[in-house]
Image: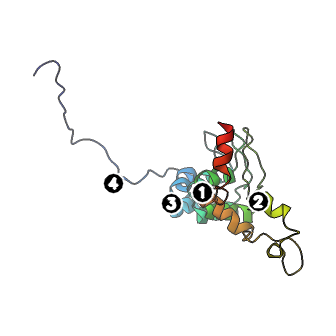
Amino acid sequence: MASSEIEVVSSSSSVSKPNDQPLILDVFTASAHGDFNKLRTFVEQHGASVSVPDVNGYYALQWASLNNFHDIAHYLIQHGADVNAKDSMQQTALHWAAVRGSTAAADVLVENGAQIGAADINGYRFKIARNVTTNEVANSSRYDYLRGPDGRFRNPYNHGCWKNCADFLSLGYTNDDEIAWPRLQQVAT
């Protein structure tokens, strides 16, 4: 064999997990991978705490929220997890849910008292969009379609806090303001 050639040798003694299942070692990995049965075993039989962070400073509730395991998030909260616990970056489980658009987990967190306006060290906050345009507010006194039966301003695009929050997390910004942007972008360049 020439010195520039590489010989590939396969080894039959390589170790692999059966069915490539993740290794669940504690409440954190059980929460991150959605293994409800093992999580219950750790908490109920082994007395593992759900209110302390792992060695990296992250909470089980953050892992469950990131991966949208709403049932696990609810279980963790019922067993003492703090919905507003912050890691070293000052992020809560709600920040983690927002990263991946985990709407079901975000709902559980908000229903259980998560602080929506909590900012991390970079100033990022979880926000709920109201879907009100400047034009609608300015013209609310002129157009009847913007008035509800009680005579007060109403936004026809406002479907309630939970629906707007879920839409924002799963869909991101909508395209209903795209018409004005090309002109603004031309001015900015």
Quarter placement of the C terminus: top right
Q: Marks 4/2: CA distance?
A: 54 Å
Q: Mark 3 or 2 closer to N-term?
A: 3
Q: Determine the CA span between mark 4 and mark 3.
A: 16 Å
The type of residue carrying mark 1 is: Gly
Give the crowd class for mark 3: few <14, some 14-19, many >=20 residues within 10 Å. some
Q: Please, what is the three-letter code of the amino acid marked with disc 3? A: Asp
Location of residue 151 (image quadrant) = bottom right
User: Which of the two discs, 4 and 2, labels the residue nearer the N terminus?
Assistant: 4
Disc 4 designates what residue? 18
Q: CA distance from mark 3 to mark 2?
A: 43 Å
Residue wearing tag 3? 35
The amino acid type of the residue labelled 4 equals Pro
Above or below, 167 relative to 3? below
Residue 129, position as x, y percentages in the image? 73, 59
Relative to the observer, which residue lies in front, 39 or 138? 138
Q: Position of residue 147 (x, y in %)?
A: 84, 75
Q: Earlier in the sequence, mark 1 or mark 4?
A: 4
Disc 1 element: loop
Which residue is identified by label 1? 101
Q: Quadrant of the N terminus?
A: top left
Measured in 3D between alpha carbons, the distance from the residue under mark 1 to the one under mark 3, in whole angstroms, is: 20 Å
